[in-house]
Amino acid sequence: MRFAVFLALGAGCAAAVPAHDVLSQTSLLKGKRKMNLLQEVPGLVPLPSAAKVAGLDTNNIQGDILVGMKKKQERFIFWTINDPARFKSTLRAFIVPQITSVQQLLSTTTQPLVALNVAFSQTGLQALNITDNLSDAAFSRGQFADANALGDPDPTKNGTAWVDAFRGTNIHGVFLLASDNATLLDAQEVVVNSSMGSAISVVYTLQGSIRPGPQAGHEAFGYLDGVSQPHVDGFGTAFPGQQTIDPGVILVGEQGDSLSAKRPAWTTDGSFLAFRQLKQLVPEWNKFIASSAPGVPGLTHAQSVALHGARLVGRWKSGAPVDLSPLVDNATLGADPTLNNNFDYTHQGFDLSSDQSHCPFASHVRKTRPRADLDAAPNSIIRAGIPYGPEVTDDELTSATSTLDRGLAFVSYQSQIAKGFRFIQASWANNEKFSFGKNDTTPGFDAVIGANRGGQRFMSGYDINDASKDLSLLTDFVVSKGGEYFFSPSISALRDFITAP
Ligand code: N7H
Protein backbone atom coordinates (compact mmCIF):
# COMPACT_ATOMS: atom_id res chain seq x y z
CA MET A 1 0.00 0.00 0.00
CA ARG A 2 1.34 3.41 -0.91
CA PHE A 3 0.83 6.21 1.59
CA ALA A 4 2.09 9.68 2.18
CA VAL A 5 2.73 11.66 5.32
CA PHE A 6 2.62 15.39 5.41
CA LEU A 7 5.59 17.64 5.78
CA ALA A 8 5.06 21.30 6.41
CA LEU A 9 7.53 23.21 4.28
CA GLY A 10 7.25 26.83 5.17
CA ALA A 11 4.76 29.59 5.76
CA GLY A 12 1.44 27.83 5.77
CA CYS A 13 2.15 25.29 3.05
CA ALA A 14 2.18 21.57 3.55
CA ALA A 15 3.43 19.02 1.05
CA ALA A 16 3.20 15.28 1.04
CA VAL A 17 6.49 13.50 1.60
CA PRO A 18 6.56 9.91 0.39
CA ALA A 19 6.95 7.46 3.23
CA HIS A 20 10.17 6.02 1.81
CA ASP A 21 11.75 9.49 1.97
CA VAL A 22 10.81 9.77 5.61
CA LEU A 23 12.25 6.33 6.22
CA SER A 24 15.53 7.24 4.55
CA GLN A 25 15.73 10.41 6.67
CA THR A 26 14.95 8.39 9.79
CA SER A 27 17.81 6.03 9.02
CA LEU A 28 20.20 9.01 8.90
CA LEU A 29 19.29 9.71 12.50
CA LYS A 30 20.29 6.28 13.73
CA GLY A 31 23.75 5.75 15.08
CA LYS A 32 25.94 7.29 17.69
CA ARG A 33 27.43 10.71 17.90
CA LYS A 34 31.22 10.77 17.62
CA MET A 35 31.92 14.52 17.62
CA ASN A 36 30.76 16.99 20.24
CA LEU A 37 27.53 18.67 19.16
CA LEU A 38 28.69 21.81 20.96
CA GLN A 39 31.64 23.99 20.09
CA GLU A 40 34.26 24.54 22.76
CA VAL A 41 35.03 28.23 22.20
CA PRO A 42 38.15 29.62 23.92
CA GLY A 43 37.12 32.37 26.33
CA LEU A 44 33.77 30.86 27.26
CA VAL A 45 33.27 29.06 30.56
CA PRO A 46 33.58 25.31 29.91
CA LEU A 47 30.56 23.15 30.66
CA PRO A 48 30.54 21.47 34.03
CA SER A 49 31.25 17.78 34.03
CA ALA A 50 28.31 15.63 35.08
CA ALA A 51 30.09 15.07 38.40
CA LYS A 52 29.96 18.76 39.27
CA VAL A 53 26.20 19.10 38.90
CA ALA A 54 24.51 19.03 42.28
CA GLY A 55 21.00 19.68 43.43
CA LEU A 56 19.38 20.16 40.04
CA ASP A 57 17.43 17.47 38.23
CA THR A 58 19.41 17.85 35.03
CA ASN A 59 17.76 14.77 33.51
CA ASN A 60 14.44 16.58 33.70
CA ILE A 61 15.44 20.05 32.43
CA GLN A 62 15.43 20.72 28.69
CA GLY A 63 19.01 21.03 27.54
CA ASP A 64 18.92 24.42 25.86
CA ILE A 65 18.01 26.15 29.12
CA LEU A 66 21.38 25.61 30.81
CA VAL A 67 23.57 24.52 27.89
CA GLY A 68 22.40 26.73 25.06
CA MET A 69 25.28 28.97 24.08
CA LYS A 70 27.65 26.70 22.21
CA LYS A 71 25.56 25.13 19.50
CA LYS A 72 27.11 24.72 16.07
CA GLN A 73 23.84 24.82 14.17
CA GLU A 74 20.28 25.34 15.27
CA ARG A 75 16.96 25.39 13.51
CA PHE A 76 13.91 27.08 15.03
CA ILE A 77 10.62 25.71 13.71
CA PHE A 78 7.59 27.76 14.69
CA TRP A 79 4.16 26.23 14.32
CA THR A 80 0.52 26.51 15.04
CA ILE A 81 -1.61 23.59 16.22
CA ASN A 82 -4.47 22.47 13.96
CA ASP A 83 -5.47 19.25 15.66
CA PRO A 84 -4.86 19.27 19.43
CA ALA A 85 -5.68 15.58 19.96
CA ARG A 86 -3.33 14.37 17.25
CA PHE A 87 -0.70 16.89 18.33
CA LYS A 88 -0.79 15.62 21.92
CA SER A 89 -0.61 11.96 21.01
CA THR A 90 2.26 12.49 18.57
CA LEU A 91 4.16 14.65 21.01
CA ARG A 92 3.76 11.99 23.68
CA ALA A 93 4.62 8.99 21.54
CA PHE A 94 7.27 10.42 19.29
CA ILE A 95 8.69 13.77 20.42
CA VAL A 96 8.83 13.54 24.22
CA PRO A 97 11.04 10.42 24.24
CA GLN A 98 13.50 12.36 22.09
CA ILE A 99 13.60 15.59 24.12
CA THR A 100 17.21 16.29 25.01
CA SER A 101 18.01 17.03 28.63
CA VAL A 102 20.77 19.15 30.16
CA GLN A 103 22.44 15.97 31.36
CA GLN A 104 22.57 14.45 27.88
CA LEU A 105 24.26 17.52 26.44
CA LEU A 106 27.10 17.44 28.96
CA SER A 107 28.95 14.59 27.28
CA THR A 108 29.48 13.64 23.63
CA THR A 109 28.74 10.03 24.51
CA THR A 110 25.20 10.89 25.64
CA GLN A 111 24.45 13.62 23.09
CA PRO A 112 21.98 12.68 20.38
CA LEU A 113 22.74 13.25 16.70
CA VAL A 114 20.21 16.08 16.78
CA ALA A 115 19.16 17.69 20.05
CA LEU A 116 15.45 18.40 20.23
CA ASN A 117 13.66 20.80 22.57
CA VAL A 118 10.12 22.19 22.52
CA ALA A 119 8.42 25.25 24.00
CA PHE A 120 4.88 26.66 23.94
CA SER A 121 3.39 30.12 23.72
CA GLN A 122 0.39 31.12 25.84
CA THR A 123 -1.94 30.53 22.88
CA GLY A 124 -0.27 27.15 22.34
CA LEU A 125 -1.12 26.08 25.89
CA GLN A 126 -4.64 27.34 25.36
CA ALA A 127 -4.95 25.33 22.16
CA LEU A 128 -4.14 22.28 24.29
CA ASN A 129 -6.81 23.32 26.76
CA ILE A 130 -4.26 24.15 29.44
CA THR A 131 -5.78 27.11 31.20
CA ASP A 132 -3.49 27.38 34.25
CA ASN A 133 -2.20 30.84 35.00
CA LEU A 134 1.61 30.73 34.81
CA SER A 135 1.81 34.10 36.57
CA ASP A 136 3.81 35.77 33.86
CA ALA A 137 1.90 38.66 32.34
CA ALA A 138 4.29 39.20 29.43
CA PHE A 139 4.04 35.53 28.48
CA SER A 140 0.23 35.66 28.75
CA ARG A 141 -0.04 38.67 26.45
CA GLY A 142 2.56 37.48 23.96
CA GLN A 143 5.43 39.49 22.53
CA PHE A 144 3.45 41.26 19.82
CA ALA A 145 1.55 43.15 22.54
CA ASP A 146 4.91 43.95 24.17
CA ALA A 147 6.56 45.54 21.13
CA ASN A 148 6.01 49.09 22.32
CA ALA A 149 7.36 48.33 25.80
CA LEU A 150 10.45 46.74 24.23
CA GLY A 151 11.15 49.91 22.25
CA ASP A 152 10.34 48.47 18.82
CA PRO A 153 8.82 50.72 16.17
CA ASP A 154 5.07 50.01 15.96
CA PRO A 155 4.79 46.54 14.36
CA THR A 156 1.22 47.17 13.23
CA LYS A 157 2.36 49.95 10.89
CA ASN A 158 3.31 49.58 7.25
CA GLY A 159 7.01 49.09 6.74
CA THR A 160 7.48 47.25 10.04
CA ALA A 161 10.52 45.02 10.25
CA TRP A 162 8.53 42.44 12.24
CA VAL A 163 8.28 39.10 10.49
CA ASP A 164 4.65 38.43 9.54
CA ALA A 165 4.53 35.21 11.55
CA PHE A 166 5.35 37.09 14.77
CA ARG A 167 2.64 39.70 14.26
CA GLY A 168 -0.19 38.49 16.44
CA THR A 169 -0.55 35.46 18.66
CA ASN A 170 -0.74 32.82 15.98
CA ILE A 171 2.44 30.95 16.90
CA HIS A 172 1.67 28.13 19.33
CA GLY A 173 5.12 26.72 19.83
CA VAL A 174 8.61 26.11 18.59
CA PHE A 175 10.83 23.09 18.06
CA LEU A 176 14.52 23.82 18.63
CA LEU A 177 16.75 21.44 16.69
CA ALA A 178 20.50 21.59 17.30
CA SER A 179 23.28 19.67 15.63
CA ASP A 180 26.66 20.07 13.99
CA ASN A 181 25.51 19.38 10.49
CA ALA A 182 22.75 20.58 8.20
CA THR A 183 22.02 17.14 6.72
CA LEU A 184 21.15 15.83 10.16
CA LEU A 185 19.03 18.89 10.87
CA ASP A 186 17.21 18.43 7.55
CA ALA A 187 16.57 14.79 8.40
CA GLN A 188 15.24 15.57 11.86
CA GLU A 189 13.06 18.36 10.47
CA VAL A 190 11.50 15.97 7.95
CA VAL A 191 10.96 13.29 10.55
CA VAL A 192 9.51 15.61 13.21
CA ASN A 193 7.24 17.50 10.82
CA SER A 194 6.03 14.38 9.08
CA SER A 195 5.23 12.70 12.38
CA MET A 196 3.07 15.71 13.24
CA GLY A 197 1.50 15.71 9.78
CA SER A 198 -1.60 17.87 9.62
CA ALA A 199 -1.65 18.29 13.42
CA ILE A 200 0.47 21.42 12.97
CA SER A 201 1.25 23.97 10.29
CA VAL A 202 4.75 25.33 10.24
CA VAL A 203 4.48 29.11 10.03
CA TYR A 204 8.15 30.12 10.12
CA THR A 205 11.63 28.64 10.37
CA LEU A 206 14.97 30.25 11.09
CA GLN A 207 18.36 28.60 10.68
CA GLY A 208 21.22 29.66 12.94
CA SER A 209 24.87 28.69 12.56
CA ILE A 210 28.10 29.30 14.32
CA ARG A 211 30.19 31.65 12.15
CA PRO A 212 33.01 30.11 10.09
CA GLY A 213 36.71 29.78 10.90
CA PRO A 214 38.18 32.17 13.44
CA GLN A 215 34.80 33.90 13.79
CA ALA A 216 33.39 30.81 15.54
CA GLY A 217 31.72 32.01 18.74
CA HIS A 218 31.63 35.64 17.54
CA GLU A 219 28.38 37.41 16.71
CA ALA A 220 27.83 39.23 13.43
CA PHE A 221 29.60 42.49 14.39
CA GLY A 222 32.64 40.35 15.19
CA TYR A 223 32.63 40.30 19.01
CA LEU A 224 33.04 37.11 21.02
CA ASP A 225 29.61 36.27 22.44
CA GLY A 226 28.50 34.15 25.38
CA VAL A 227 31.47 35.09 27.56
CA SER A 228 29.55 36.19 30.63
CA GLN A 229 26.73 33.94 31.74
CA PRO A 230 25.46 33.73 35.30
CA HIS A 231 26.53 30.70 37.32
CA VAL A 232 23.41 28.81 38.36
CA ASP A 233 23.98 27.62 41.89
CA GLY A 234 24.28 23.84 41.80
CA PHE A 235 25.36 23.70 38.17
CA GLY A 236 29.15 23.53 38.07
CA THR A 237 31.39 25.96 39.91
CA ALA A 238 31.62 29.71 39.46
CA PHE A 239 34.49 31.19 37.46
CA PRO A 240 36.04 34.45 38.73
CA GLY A 241 33.61 37.32 38.15
CA GLN A 242 30.73 35.05 37.28
CA GLN A 243 27.54 36.06 39.03
CA THR A 244 26.14 33.22 41.12
CA ILE A 245 22.36 33.20 41.04
CA ASP A 246 19.71 31.05 42.65
CA PRO A 247 18.44 28.37 40.25
CA GLY A 248 14.97 29.92 40.60
CA VAL A 249 16.10 33.03 38.71
CA ILE A 250 16.14 30.81 35.63
CA LEU A 251 14.08 27.75 36.58
CA VAL A 252 10.47 28.07 37.63
CA GLY A 253 9.66 26.67 41.08
CA GLU A 254 13.28 26.44 42.21
CA GLN A 255 14.89 28.32 45.11
CA GLY A 256 14.79 32.01 44.24
CA ASP A 257 11.68 32.02 42.05
CA SER A 258 9.61 34.51 44.02
CA LEU A 259 6.41 33.41 42.24
CA SER A 260 6.76 29.70 43.03
CA ALA A 261 3.77 29.60 45.35
CA LYS A 262 1.46 30.97 42.66
CA ARG A 263 2.55 28.62 39.94
CA PRO A 264 1.12 25.21 39.10
CA ALA A 265 3.33 22.33 40.22
CA TRP A 266 3.85 21.07 36.68
CA THR A 267 5.78 24.24 35.75
CA THR A 268 8.66 23.36 38.12
CA ASP A 269 12.00 23.10 36.32
CA GLY A 270 10.62 24.78 33.24
CA SER A 271 11.79 28.19 32.05
CA PHE A 272 10.40 31.06 30.01
CA LEU A 273 12.10 31.45 26.66
CA ALA A 274 12.23 34.92 25.10
CA PHE A 275 12.91 34.64 21.38
CA ARG A 276 13.88 37.65 19.27
CA GLN A 277 15.07 37.79 15.68
CA LEU A 278 17.52 40.69 15.82
CA LYS A 279 18.79 41.80 12.45
CA GLN A 280 22.25 43.37 12.54
CA LEU A 281 23.30 46.00 10.01
CA VAL A 282 26.94 44.98 9.98
CA PRO A 283 28.39 47.06 7.09
CA GLU A 284 26.48 50.10 8.37
CA TRP A 285 27.83 49.51 11.90
CA ASN A 286 31.37 49.18 10.54
CA LYS A 287 31.05 52.43 8.60
CA PHE A 288 29.57 54.26 11.57
CA ILE A 289 32.27 53.04 13.94
CA ALA A 290 35.02 54.03 11.48
CA SER A 291 33.57 57.48 10.83
CA SER A 292 32.66 58.40 14.42
CA ALA A 293 35.79 57.14 16.19
CA PRO A 294 37.52 59.90 18.14
CA GLY A 295 41.26 60.08 17.53
CA VAL A 296 43.17 58.85 20.58
CA PRO A 297 46.71 60.12 21.18
CA GLY A 298 49.22 57.30 20.81
CA LEU A 299 46.86 55.08 18.78
CA THR A 300 46.75 54.60 15.03
CA HIS A 301 43.48 55.32 13.24
CA ALA A 302 42.77 51.57 13.03
CA GLN A 303 43.42 51.19 16.76
CA SER A 304 41.15 54.15 17.56
CA VAL A 305 38.40 52.60 15.46
CA ALA A 306 38.77 49.23 17.20
CA LEU A 307 38.71 51.00 20.58
CA HIS A 308 35.56 52.93 19.62
CA GLY A 309 33.67 49.72 18.74
CA ALA A 310 34.95 48.02 21.87
CA ARG A 311 33.81 50.91 24.07
CA LEU A 312 30.29 50.73 22.61
CA VAL A 313 30.13 46.99 23.30
CA GLY A 314 32.21 46.98 26.51
CA ARG A 315 34.43 44.20 25.22
CA TRP A 316 36.98 43.90 22.46
CA LYS A 317 36.35 41.54 19.57
CA SER A 318 38.54 38.96 21.35
CA GLY A 319 36.20 39.03 24.35
CA ALA A 320 38.64 40.98 26.54
CA PRO A 321 36.70 43.54 28.63
CA VAL A 322 37.58 47.20 28.07
CA ASP A 323 37.30 47.58 31.84
CA LEU A 324 40.49 45.51 32.20
CA SER A 325 42.16 46.46 28.94
CA PRO A 326 41.04 50.02 28.24
CA LEU A 327 43.28 51.02 25.31
CA VAL A 328 44.14 48.00 23.18
CA ASP A 329 42.76 44.51 22.65
CA ASN A 330 44.38 41.66 24.56
CA ALA A 331 43.66 38.33 22.87
CA THR A 332 45.23 36.30 25.68
CA LEU A 333 42.90 37.93 28.20
CA GLY A 334 39.91 37.44 25.89
CA ALA A 335 40.59 33.72 25.58
CA ASP A 336 40.97 33.08 29.31
CA PRO A 337 37.67 32.47 31.13
CA THR A 338 39.44 32.63 34.49
CA LEU A 339 40.37 36.28 33.77
CA ASN A 340 38.04 37.75 31.15
CA ASN A 341 35.03 38.11 33.41
CA ASN A 342 36.79 39.16 36.56
CA PHE A 343 35.94 42.85 36.72
CA ASP A 344 33.23 45.05 38.17
CA TYR A 345 34.02 48.59 36.87
CA THR A 346 35.61 49.68 40.15
CA HIS A 347 39.26 50.82 40.09
CA GLN A 348 41.41 52.10 42.86
CA GLY A 349 41.78 55.86 42.58
CA PHE A 350 38.76 56.17 40.28
CA ASP A 351 35.23 57.15 41.25
CA LEU A 352 32.60 54.59 40.14
CA SER A 353 30.04 57.35 39.74
CA SER A 354 32.06 59.30 37.19
CA ASP A 355 34.79 57.09 35.72
CA GLN A 356 34.16 56.22 32.07
CA SER A 357 37.82 56.06 31.13
CA HIS A 358 37.71 52.30 31.50
CA CYS A 359 34.21 51.56 30.24
CA PRO A 360 31.33 53.85 29.22
CA PHE A 361 28.19 53.62 31.37
CA ALA A 362 26.11 53.02 28.22
CA SER A 363 28.24 50.24 26.74
CA HIS A 364 26.20 47.13 26.00
CA VAL A 365 27.71 44.87 28.64
CA ARG A 366 27.60 47.50 31.39
CA LYS A 367 23.94 48.33 30.68
CA THR A 368 22.88 44.68 30.59
CA ARG A 369 24.85 43.67 33.69
CA PRO A 370 25.78 46.68 35.76
CA ARG A 371 28.00 44.71 38.20
CA ALA A 372 29.19 47.13 40.94
CA ASP A 373 26.92 49.85 39.51
CA LEU A 374 23.96 47.86 40.87
CA ASP A 375 23.82 44.40 42.40
CA ALA A 376 20.88 42.87 40.51
CA ALA A 377 20.94 39.08 40.62
CA PRO A 378 17.20 38.62 39.94
CA ASN A 379 17.60 40.46 36.65
CA SER A 380 19.85 37.79 35.19
CA ILE A 381 19.19 35.72 32.12
CA ILE A 382 20.88 32.79 30.46
CA ARG A 383 21.54 33.62 26.84
CA ALA A 384 21.28 30.81 24.31
CA GLY A 385 21.19 32.60 20.96
CA ILE A 386 23.03 31.85 17.74
CA PRO A 387 23.95 33.97 14.71
CA TYR A 388 21.80 33.60 11.61
CA GLY A 389 22.28 34.62 7.98
CA PRO A 390 25.23 34.69 5.59
CA GLU A 391 28.61 36.34 6.05
CA VAL A 392 28.90 39.92 4.79
CA THR A 393 29.63 40.00 1.05
CA ASP A 394 32.24 42.18 -0.65
CA ASP A 395 29.47 44.21 -2.31
CA GLU A 396 27.85 44.93 1.03
CA LEU A 397 31.19 45.93 2.51
CA THR A 398 31.99 48.28 -0.37
CA SER A 399 28.56 49.90 -0.42
CA ALA A 400 28.28 49.89 3.40
CA THR A 401 24.73 48.67 2.89
CA SER A 402 23.17 45.42 4.09
CA THR A 403 21.33 43.67 1.29
CA LEU A 404 21.13 40.30 3.05
CA ASP A 405 19.44 39.46 6.33
CA ARG A 406 21.77 38.46 9.14
CA GLY A 407 21.91 38.89 12.86
CA LEU A 408 21.22 37.13 16.10
CA ALA A 409 18.53 34.54 16.78
CA PHE A 410 18.38 35.77 20.36
CA VAL A 411 17.17 33.36 23.03
CA SER A 412 17.11 34.02 26.74
CA TYR A 413 15.84 31.90 29.60
CA GLN A 414 14.46 33.25 32.86
CA SER A 415 11.80 32.32 35.42
CA GLN A 416 10.05 35.67 35.02
CA ILE A 417 10.15 37.54 31.72
CA ALA A 418 9.34 40.81 33.48
CA LYS A 419 12.50 40.50 35.58
CA GLY A 420 14.69 38.95 32.92
CA PHE A 421 14.77 39.82 29.21
CA ARG A 422 12.01 42.42 29.37
CA PHE A 423 13.56 44.25 32.30
CA ILE A 424 17.05 44.32 30.81
CA GLN A 425 15.75 45.55 27.45
CA ALA A 426 13.13 48.04 28.62
CA SER A 427 14.39 49.30 31.98
CA TRP A 428 18.12 49.27 31.39
CA ALA A 429 19.08 49.20 27.69
CA ASN A 430 16.31 51.57 26.54
CA ASN A 431 16.43 53.79 29.60
CA GLU A 432 18.67 56.79 28.92
CA LYS A 433 18.79 57.56 32.65
CA PHE A 434 20.25 54.17 33.63
CA SER A 435 22.71 53.53 35.38
CA PHE A 436 21.48 55.68 38.21
CA GLY A 437 23.61 57.64 40.61
CA LYS A 438 26.17 58.76 38.04
CA ASN A 439 27.59 62.25 37.65
CA ASP A 440 25.95 62.22 34.22
CA THR A 441 22.25 61.65 34.93
CA THR A 442 21.51 60.65 31.34
CA PRO A 443 24.18 58.16 30.25
CA GLY A 444 22.05 57.37 27.19
CA PHE A 445 20.90 54.25 25.37
CA ASP A 446 22.66 50.90 25.28
CA ALA A 447 24.83 51.53 22.25
CA VAL A 448 24.06 48.12 20.71
CA ILE A 449 20.50 47.11 21.62
CA GLY A 450 19.01 50.26 23.18
CA ALA A 451 15.84 51.08 21.26
CA ASN A 452 13.68 54.18 21.08
CA ARG A 453 10.77 53.00 18.89
CA GLY A 454 12.76 54.03 15.83
CA GLY A 455 13.51 57.50 17.23
CA GLN A 456 16.88 59.05 17.89
CA ARG A 457 19.36 57.51 20.30
CA PHE A 458 22.54 58.78 21.88
CA MET A 459 25.12 57.63 24.39
CA SER A 460 27.55 59.55 26.55
CA GLY A 461 31.05 58.70 27.66
CA TYR A 462 32.15 57.20 24.34
CA ASP A 463 35.24 59.42 24.06
CA ILE A 464 37.94 58.12 26.36
CA ASN A 465 39.42 61.61 26.62
CA ASP A 466 36.26 63.62 27.14
CA ALA A 467 33.39 61.86 28.89
CA SER A 468 31.18 64.94 28.63
CA LYS A 469 30.56 64.46 24.89
CA ASP A 470 27.47 62.64 23.56
CA LEU A 471 27.50 60.39 20.52
CA SER A 472 24.47 60.36 18.27
CA LEU A 473 23.82 56.72 17.33
CA LEU A 474 22.71 57.51 13.80
CA THR A 475 20.44 54.56 13.22
CA ASP A 476 19.39 51.29 14.86
CA PHE A 477 22.21 48.91 13.97
CA VAL A 478 20.21 46.14 15.65
CA VAL A 479 16.71 45.97 14.20
CA SER A 480 14.02 43.91 15.90
CA LYS A 481 12.21 41.58 13.55
CA GLY A 482 10.00 40.54 16.44
CA GLY A 483 9.64 37.27 18.24
CA GLU A 484 7.53 35.49 20.79
CA TYR A 485 7.57 34.42 24.43
CA PHE A 486 7.43 30.71 25.18
CA PHE A 487 7.45 28.35 28.12
CA SER A 488 9.89 25.46 27.97
CA PRO A 489 8.48 22.80 30.33
CA SER A 490 10.40 20.12 32.16
CA ILE A 491 10.53 16.73 30.46
CA SER A 492 8.32 15.14 33.11
CA ALA A 493 5.73 17.92 32.64
CA LEU A 494 5.71 17.23 28.91
CA ARG A 495 5.19 13.54 29.56
CA ASP A 496 2.85 13.53 32.57
CA PHE A 497 0.88 16.73 32.17
CA ILE A 498 0.98 18.42 28.78
CA THR A 499 0.51 15.24 26.78
CA ALA A 500 -1.36 13.21 29.39
CA PRO A 501 -4.14 11.28 27.61
FE1 N7H B 1 24.18 41.07 24.37
N1 N7H B 1 27.23 42.36 20.88
O1 N7H B 1 27.85 41.87 19.98
O2 N7H B 1 27.38 43.55 21.13
N2 N7H B 1 26.21 40.89 24.13
N3 N7H B 1 23.98 41.35 22.37
N4 N7H B 1 22.15 41.10 24.60
N5 N7H B 1 24.40 40.70 26.34
C1 N7H B 1 27.10 40.58 25.12
O3 N7H B 1 29.55 38.45 27.66
C2 N7H B 1 24.98 41.56 21.44
C3 N7H B 1 21.23 41.24 23.62
C4 N7H B 1 23.37 40.66 27.29
O4 N7H B 1 27.40 39.80 32.05
C5 N7H B 1 28.43 40.58 24.58
O5 N7H B 1 28.67 37.27 26.06
C6 N7H B 1 24.35 41.76 20.15
C7 N7H B 1 19.91 41.35 24.19
C8 N7H B 1 23.91 40.32 28.59
O6 N7H B 1 28.78 41.33 31.39
C9 N7H B 1 28.32 40.90 23.26
C10 N7H B 1 23.00 41.64 20.33
C11 N7H B 1 20.07 41.26 25.55
C12 N7H B 1 25.27 40.17 28.41
C13 N7H B 1 26.93 41.13 22.97
C14 N7H B 1 22.76 41.40 21.72
C15 N7H B 1 21.49 41.09 25.79
C16 N7H B 1 25.55 40.41 27.00
C17 N7H B 1 29.74 40.36 25.35
C18 N7H B 1 21.89 41.76 19.34
C19 N7H B 1 19.04 41.33 26.64
C20 N7H B 1 26.28 39.81 29.48
C21 N7H B 1 30.14 38.95 25.43
C22 N7H B 1 22.01 41.57 18.06
C23 N7H B 1 17.96 42.05 26.57
C24 N7H B 1 26.77 41.06 30.20
C25 N7H B 1 29.40 38.17 26.47
C26 N7H B 1 27.74 40.70 31.32
C27 N7H B 1 26.81 40.33 26.44
C28 N7H B 1 26.36 41.63 21.76
C29 N7H B 1 21.52 41.26 22.28
C30 N7H B 1 22.04 40.92 27.05
C31 N7H B 1 29.51 40.98 22.32
C32 N7H B 1 25.03 42.06 18.84
C33 N7H B 1 18.61 41.53 23.41
C34 N7H B 1 23.12 40.16 29.89
Image: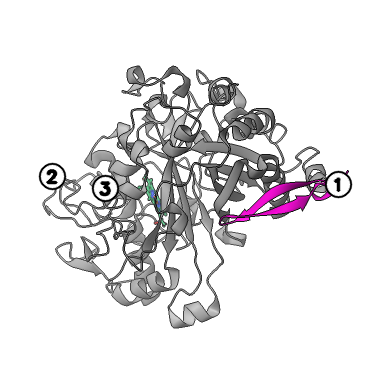
**3D distance between C-alphas at marks 2 and 3:** 19 Å
Q: Which residue is drawn at 45% across and 32% down?
A: 271
Q: Residue furthest front?
A: 1
Image quadrant in which you'd find residue 414 = top left
Neighbour tally class for label 1: few under 14, some 14-19, many 20 plus, Cα within 10 Å:
few
The C terminus - image quarter: top right
- Up the image or down, 386 lies above or below 142; here it is below
Q: Give the range drawn in magenta.
A: 1-21
Q: Which of 77 and 478 is in front in this view?
A: 77
The N terminus - image quarter: top right
Q: Which of marks 1 and 3 is nearer the N terminus?
A: 1
Q: Where is residue 356 in the image (x, y as percent from the top left)?
A: 22, 55
Q: Position of residue 498 (x, y in %)?
A: 54, 26
Name the residue tied to disc 2: 437
- Up the image or down, 498 lies above or below 114; here it is above
Residue 356 marker: none
Q: Is residue 307 magenta?
A: no
Residue 426 marker: 3
Q: Is mark 2 on a helix, strand or loop?
A: loop
Q: Nearer the viewer, residue 120 or 464?
A: 120
Mark 1 residue's CB less than 8 Å from ligand 1: no
- Dominant SS of magenta comes to strand
Q: Which residue is drawn at 78% across and 37% down?
A: 32
Residue 2 marker: 1
Q: Is mark 3 on a helix, strand or loop?
A: helix
The reply to whether residue 371 is in sight is yes
